Amino acid sequence: MTTIAELSLSTDEFALAETLQQLPALDVRVESVVAEGPTRTVPLVWFSNVDRDDLETALESDPTVAEYRRLLESTEDGELFYRLEYAATVESVCQCVYTDGGTVLDAQVTDGQWTLRLLFPHREELSDAVSAIEDCGVRVDVRRMVEAGQDEELETTAALTEPQQEAIAEAYRQGYYDVPREISLEELANELDISHQALSERLRRANRVLAGEQLDSPSGEMATPD
């Protein structure tokens, strides 16, 4: 079933990283994203709260931007509309979405985070795309996920990716959460054949999702052991 998901990525690890560092007051809103062939991603982006010359100077020096072209400048509200072409580092993340059949519906930057709203024909393809993005070394959180035809959001646990599910399940089976622990993080990483850092990140994100599920429960209280 068609799935719409909202993903969050740090601006430091994705597009326009240096531009946003140089211009912290900059507002960014992606109008649409076009995939031109298997390797080129061409977003159409609105910028505001910035001087045009300052913006273009920042874009010129930003290693995540291969090319840019100004399409429109609104004199009323000061918005600037650009066609961008991303560099290879960002392209690899975008291709993780397109390879698994995803479409970028929109994207924006808020409080140092990119928020991407994506559409996938099937939920499994979303999970595969998130796993592929993580394999590129980019941290990603699935904030929301809704299936077409449903008014309610899917349960939070469904937002766990397969690697996250595998990591947290194996950690539980091996006694990582026991007191005292039956296995160290390093030993568990060796069992799963991944790096210590990768496992730590997967468990952190999985724990955050599960904690959020408890906080968002109808009782509004965390479950506590007897």
Image: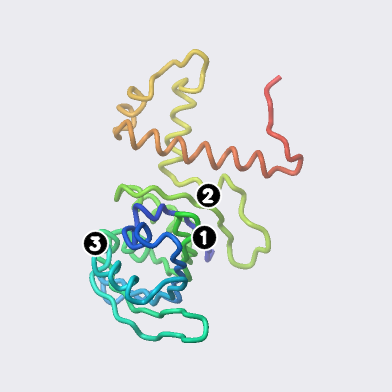
Q: Earlier in the sequence, mark 3 or mark 1?
A: 1
Q: In which image quadrant can residue 25 be found?
A: bottom left
Amino acid type, mark 3: Pro
The quadrant of the rendering that contains the C terminus is: top right
In x, y percent, where is residue 6? Answer: 51, 59
Q: Earlier in the sequence, mark 1 or mark 2?
A: 1
The amino acid on which the numbered mark 2 sits, given as a three-letter code, is Ala
Q: Quadrant of residue 24?
A: bottom left
Residue 63's label in the rendered image is: 3
Mark 1 in CB contact with mark 2 (< 8 angstroms): yes
Q: Nearer the viewer, residue 82 or 205?
A: 82
SS at badge 1: strand
Neighbour tally class for label 2: few under 14, some 14-19, many 20 plus, Cα within 10 Å: many
Label 2: state its secondary structure. Answer: helix
Q: Which residue is denoted by mark 1 in the rendering?
A: 5
- Residue that numbered label 2 is attached to: 159
Q: Residue at left 62%, top 42%?
A: 213
Question: Above or below — where is 61 with respect to 168?
Answer: below
Residue depicted at x 48% and y 62%: 122
